[in-house]
Image: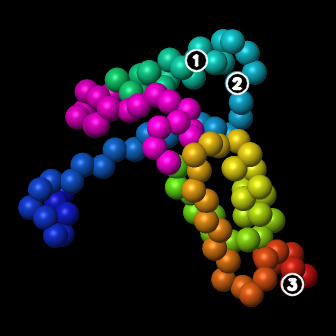
């Protein structure tokens, strides 16, 4: 596959990490760590750039855009700055006021 404006091949890499639930036991933590290590090894073996292990907010500035100032967007705008250092956050809302569909019900 090549990009339409380039003669260089474009490779796409996808890494899916399950964040739907927190691990409840040391065994689950070890299991997830092993799965992450296996995914990292596979990506490296296939020529993907190396993954960097660090916490959110460490290293370069994390830029986050929240689309919509409804219930979830406002919640994200409150939660993220409380838990992520070095964050640049922008919230976009197309309506004249915040609240999403709840504001119109």
Reading the image, the residue beneath label 3 is: 104
Please give left or right for residue 63 compared with residue 83 in the image: left
- 3 or 1: mark nearer the eye: 3
Residue 42 placed where, x, y %?
Answer: 33, 27
The image shows residue 48, relative to residue 12, as above or below, that is: above
- Please report contact status of discs 1 and 2: CB closer than 8 Å, yes or no: yes
Q: At numbered mark 2, what does the secondary structure look like: helix, strand or loop?
A: loop
Which quadrant of the figure contains the N terminus?
bottom left
Q: Does residue 59 appear left or right of residue 65 in this picture?
A: left
Q: Is residue 45 above or below residue 72?
A: above
| Most foreground residue, 66 or 81 | 81
Q: What's the coloring here?
A: rainbow
Q: Residues within 10 Å of mark 1 (few under 14, many from 20)?
A: few
Q: Which residues are magenta?
A: 42-61
Image quadrant where residue 56 sits: top right
Outermost residue, right side: 105
Sequence-first tag of 3 and 1: 1
Residue visible at 29% across and 37% down in the picture: 49
Q: Which mark is residue 90?
A: none
SS for callout 1: helix
Q: Say if residue 72 shows up in the picture.
A: no
Asked whether residue 53 is drawn in magenta, I would say yes
Cα separation, mark 3 vs mark 2, equals 38 Å
Residue 82 is situated, as x and y percent measured from the top left of the image, at 74, 46
Q: Main secondary structure of the magenta part?
A: loop
- In which image quadrant can residue 98 be found? bottom right
Measure the alpha-carbon separation of dots 3 and 1.
45 Å
Q: Residue at x 52, y 55 (%)?
A: 63
The mark that comes first in sequence, 1 or 2, is 2
Residue annotated with mark 2: 23
**Residue ID for mark 1:** 31
């Amino acid at each position: 596959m090549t990009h339409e404006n380039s003669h260089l091949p474009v490779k796409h890499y996808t890494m899916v990490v399950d964040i739907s639930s927190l691990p409840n036991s040391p065994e689950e933590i070890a299991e997830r760590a092993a799965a992450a290590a296996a995914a990292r090894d596979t990506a490296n073996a296939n020529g993907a750039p190396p993954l960097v292990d660090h916490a959110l907010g460490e290293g370069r500035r994390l830029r986050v855009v929240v689309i919509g100032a409804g219930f979830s967007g406002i919640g994200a705008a409150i939660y993220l700055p409380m838990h992520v250092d070095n964050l640049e956050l922008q919230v976009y809302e197309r309506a004249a006021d915040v609240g999403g569909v709840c504001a119109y019900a």
